[in-house]
Image (cartoon, rainbow, N blue to C red):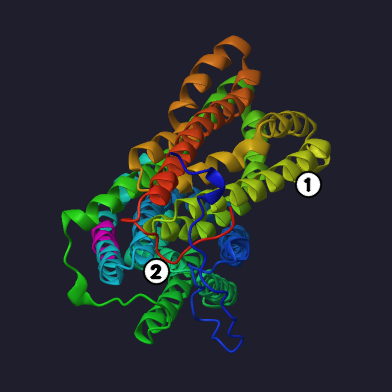
Amino acid sequence: MNAPLSTLEDPVPAPVTPDFEESLLKPSDLADPRLFSLIMRLALPSVCGLSIHALHHVVNAAFIGNVGPEAVAAVSVVFPIFLFISAIGHGLGVGCAASIGRHLGAGNTDEANSTATIGLGLAGLVGVACTVGLLIWLTPLLRLFGATPAILPPAQDYVGVLAFGCAFTLLQILCDFIVISEGNTRFSMWTLIGGFTLNIILDPIFIFGCNLGVSGAALATMTSQLAALAAFALYFKKSAGNLRVHWRLFRPTVAILRPIFSVGLPATLTTALSAITFTLIYRTAGAYGGEAAIAAIGIALRVFTLGELPLVGFCIGAQAVLSYAWGAKAPLRVLSATRFMLLVTTAFAVAHSVVILTFSHAIVGLFTKDPSVLALGTQAVIAFHLFFGLTGLQLVVLVLLQSLDKGRSAAIVSLAPQGYLLIPPLLILPRLWGLDGVIMAPAVAIALTVVIAGLFLWRETEALKRFALRGALSSDTPARSCSGPL
């Protein structure tokens, strides 16, 4: 006889009295029964931190712009190199964070500590390898990415400094994901704010005061990364969180590496692929519409990213709840968290879409006064946001699959909007409709991605319900103390 679904509730622990004297450095309790409040406490600092990170690039570009056009061009040319390095860190971070969350939820603290240590060790080793590779093949790489004789010297100066900080970049990304995975998005946020503030202070000092130019910008960035790493090192040394990191735990095994790479590799490929697809979009737009089309597409992508960043930050912060709940064998808590995340992200995405679609012409006007760019940019912004209201679904499903250790499914969802569902329309539609086809290609990719994500959401939701039903009918697999409202 089947039990009614109304009885399929994970056991709810006794209410926890908040300790208001608790240090802000302490991570949130991922088993907190106040599920919706927990998600917001984790997600909002993550949104703020990611926004600060994006603002850092804008401010850095503004300072470099005052050096001269060659400096701006030099930094633009090397951007794909460091995007690829960041993609490696992002992949390792996502893979480690999802695995750590599951281990913590299952009560396997030792495995969580080992995963964190191994992730940091891999980041350091890969960072050193990147440094060596850049120093050996620096000039050929810069020429490959389009450095002309005029901008090659400043590009060499910029990369020549930052190359020594590859390990710092990767370690900072890993540390950030690790503290988020144990529920401490607040510390992550304050560390990013501190690094951003230090970078703002050092940029004018090194660039103009010391007359170092682009080398000064690179040195300021690397110094701020070192400061952030010092904060993370102090965090782990003082055992401020639940995780313990020690070099003696660096013993890579297949059991630990498999979930890291199964989830992390698709994340790395997605970030790296975005650089390739952006280049393809710009080149196609230029072929059909010239420089005005390239500028218009660039503006539309910036506006789109402006709305997408808060959604990404929200999902990164909330992922710890999903991973922990799945590790704790609390499927109904996973379902509840997923539904709430869908509600919040969809509400934000729809509101953002309405604002952008209503004031598209005025928004594009903030970036350009050129009539042709303004007209094309308005058209592109509208096209890019036709299905933006559903973008939250794709991002939530992605972190859900990562949390459930469904690496292959996560790869299918993550690689879709900027990969196999974008490139074919980008090659076919312009042949039919010219520049209009270029503008519509990303919208088509988003719409198709949402369909695929919806199918995965339905499949995983049904699987979680079946898992909950089996748990309710069996006394042999009790869920750990981790639940929330259905």
Q: Residue at x 36, y 66 (%)?
A: 104
Q: Of the residues under marks 2 and 1, which one precedes in the sequence? A: 2
The amino acid marked with disc number 2 is Cys
In the figure, is residue 246 to the left or right of 103? left
**Looking at the image, residue 434 lies above or below residue 124:** above
Kindly identify which residue carries mark 2: 175
- Residue displayed at 18% across by 61% down: 252
Which percent across, then down, holds residue 351?
75, 44
Q: Is residue 175 above or below residue 240?
A: above
Could you say which disc has been placed on residue 46 in the image?
Answer: none
Residue beneath the point at 47% across and 37% down? 462
| Residue 279 in view here | no
Magenta part, dominant SS = helix
Please name the residue shown 40% across and 34% down the image: 412
Task: Determine the image quadrant of residue 129.
Answer: bottom left
SS for callout 2: helix
In the displayed structure, 284 sits above or below 41; it is: above
Give the magenta range. 123-132
Residue placed under numbered mark 1 in the picture: 366
Is residue 328 at least partly visible in the picture? yes
Give the spatial CA distance, label 2 vs label 1: 36 Å
Which secondary structure, mark 1?
loop
Foreground label between 2 and 1 = 2
Identity of the amino acid at label 1? Leu
Q: Is residue 281 magenta?
A: no
| Residue sticking out furthest to the bottom | 21
Q: Nearer the viewer, residue 197 or 247?
A: 247
Q: Position of residue 475 (x, y in %)?
A: 35, 56
